[in-house]
Image (cartoon, rainbow, N blue to C red):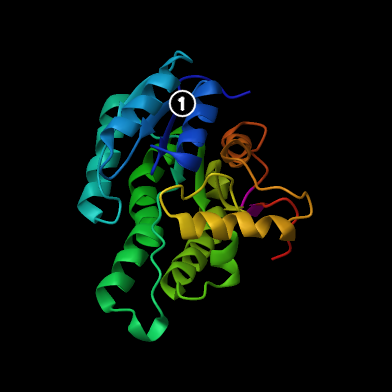
Amino acid sequence: MTRKNRTALITGSGKNIGRAIVLDLAGRGLNVVLNGSSDKTACEAVAAEAEMFGVGTLIAMGDVGVSDDCKRISGEALDKFGAVDVLVNNAAIRPTSPFLEMDEEEWNRVLAVDMSAAFWLARACLPGMIDKGWGRIINIAGMNAIQGYNGRCHVSVAKHAAWGMTKSLAKEFGSRGISANIISPGPIAGDHPDNPEMAAHIESQKSKIPLGRLGLNEEIAAAAGLLASDEGAFINGQMIQVNGGTQT
């Protein structure tokens, strides 16, 4: 059970895992702030679903890979709801480039979206959490990112950095009633429908999963829901691997 009058900000919330987390948290009674970089229509559709739970919603569009956009997104959330009690850093990009062909612009862009955004948004939301003596920071990693990507060195670096940030925040703010954890999803069914090659790769991972199937967005969202709840208060500084038992 999660008390009402709390608010969650979920980045990248127009589809897939982000959408599922929005709906899980709304079902637990949290107001939800949705974010996307370009597809506002998708965010509006998810917001309409969330409102069926009787919670407040806000759509704060913006590019989380830009510091000023993060300040504006969090500012809009704080202006409407007074505080962000649960921050879910879900938005990510995963371009593929061989290491020796990766240019500096792409490197910086991936680190900005996949890692620096979590820093910028946590800095904006933590003061309100400290004032309340309660807060949750939930970052999203990725099984392959933690193992090491072939052709995605920048993604692995960013996600390892997010894991390090998570552990540091857990230690620095745990005494304030604020937990920080990171979820590492395994292969998810239906992920990357607009990229047939990547979708086929994800499907091929099924044989490596002891449960014999791909994961569901809702199963990742359930883990986030636990971490965001009062019952999840003693989980802090952890990487929660939701991958069907795949060894990493």
Above or below, comparing residue 174 to residue 200 in the picture: above
- Say left or right for 69 vs 138: left
Q: Is residue 133 visible?
A: no
Q: Residue 178's x, y, as percent?
A: 53, 43
* Neighbour tally class for label 1: few under 14, some 14-19, many 20 plus, Cα within 10 Å: many
Above or below, comparing residue 173 to residue 162 in the picture: above
Quadrant occupied by the C terminus? bottom right
- Give yes or no for residue 240 being in the magenta stretch: yes
Q: Residue 135's x, y, as percent?
A: 50, 38
Residue visible at 61% across and 40% down?
216
Q: Residue 54's x, y, as percent?
A: 45, 13
Q: Nearer the viewer, residue 67 or 48?
A: 48
Q: Which residue is mark 1?
A: 6
Residue visible at 57% across and 47% down?
175
Image: magenta residue range: 236-241
Image-quadrant location for residue 171 = bottom right
